[in-house]
Amino acid sequence: MSTMDRSTTAFQELIGTMRQHWANQLYPALHQRYEQATQGQPPADSAQAGQAVEDLPLYHWFCFIERHYQRMKYSDPRWGLAAALSARPDWVAEQLHPAQDSAYLRLRPELPLPDYYSAIDIHQHPGNLVGADYDGLMYRASATSIHPNTRRFEAHERMAQWLQSQGNFLSVLDMGCGFGKCGFPIARHFEQAQVLGIDLSAPCLRLAARTAEQEGLRNIRFEQADAAQVPCEDASFDLVTSTQLLHELPVEVIARVLAESYRLLKPGGLVAHLDFRAHQPWPQFLIEGHSVRNNEGYLPGFNRMDIAAAYLAAGFEPVRIEPFAETEGATRADWPYWRFPWTLFWSRKPA
Ligand SMILES: C[S@@+](CC[C@H](N)C(=O)[O-])C[C@H]1O[C@@H](n2cnc3c(N)ncnc32)[C@H](O)[C@@H]1O
């Protein structure tokens, strides 16, 4: 963000540096202690995995940074992003598409927000992306530091490249598009396609629409809509996709989103939801802890649900569940640093 004062800039840089330290030094040290403690006696489940480290001061320092540096990044009263942005309403207004319909944007102010969405300040984002006009800007300013060791938005760029390996798509729906992190690379990679990004968050959609306008992208537009009930005709798209949406939904809503993905696809169309999944006790322990420390209340339910059965119940062919490398080498067994367990869930609507 270009308008921050020097103290805020210094503080935000410290947060980013601490996050790197956390992922690249603290985490490997913690993992090493875990390996030493469990040598020869692998834990049966995530609770047992946790017992190997829970009494270590190192573990408490790891948890403290994960929770409080994220909170301070947003909400520190002097140098947090919310303080910096709320002090600059004119600059914020310039960064956003006006809150009115255009070739790039359709807002539905009357759309009710689901209770599960309003219930949690997810990622510790105050107001959960719908509290203030600057929420999309705040999410964008924060979004790089939570994915250490990747280039800016690298996972989303790689997702668009993976989609290219699956064929050519002319009509694309990006569910839970946020400020367009995945929609933009898709629009650039598939120049012939019409891409529609939908989200509940008007502040994110206004930022996405403004960015598309500024970049002169003519094949993408954004609408305020619920991914569990999309106001589009059956069989409107040949690709339905999302990134980091499913883990933010309760299990029963995921089933509805998959049913919508099916309804909206043309026969033979591709569904590809990119998210997180941890199978082994240690990564499960980490992700369950992360869900508590970062207010990701629906993540454990998503991680443990029978997603293969949910895809089948929606009508899809058997789902492929594949580890996804957000950067080169990240899925290697000896990758030493902390990372989200990125996973691709993809399938097709029977032709
Ligand atoms: C973690 S963010 C991911 C945003 C973007 N896809 C990305 O990868 O950066 C999850 C997004 O899903 C949106 N969202 C949550 N529930 C939704 C729903 N039922 N319908 C549409 N969007 C939803 C949130 O507003 C948020 O923008």
Image (cartoon, rainbow, N blue to C red):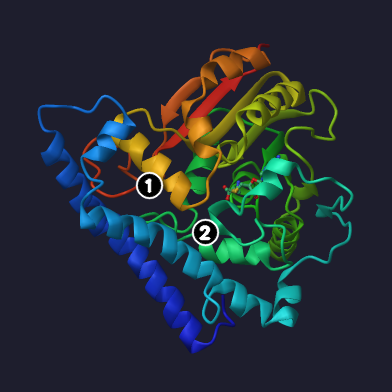
Residue at mark 2 to residue at mark 1: CA–CA distance: 16 Å
Q: Is mark 2 within 8 Å of ligand 1?
A: yes
Residue that label 1 marks: 327
Residue 125 image offset from top left, x and y in percent: 58, 59
Q: Residue at x 55, y 66 (%)?
A: 141
> Which amino acid, mark 2?
Ala
Mark 2 vs mark 1: give the one in front.
2
Instruction: Determine whether the residue tagged by mark 2 lies in a helix, strand or loop.
Output: loop
Quadrant position of the N terminus in the picture = bottom right
Instruction: Determine whether the residue tagged by mark 1 lies in a helix, strand or loop.
Output: loop
Task: Using a 10 Å C-alpha cutoff, classify the residue at mark 2 as few (fewer than 14 neighbours), some (14 to 19) or many (20 or more).
Answer: few
Q: Is mark 1 within 8 Å of ligand 1?
A: no
Residue 53 image offset from top left, x and y in percent: 22, 45
Quadrant position of the C terminus in the picture = top right
Residue that label 2 marks: 143
> Which amino acid, mark 1?
Thr
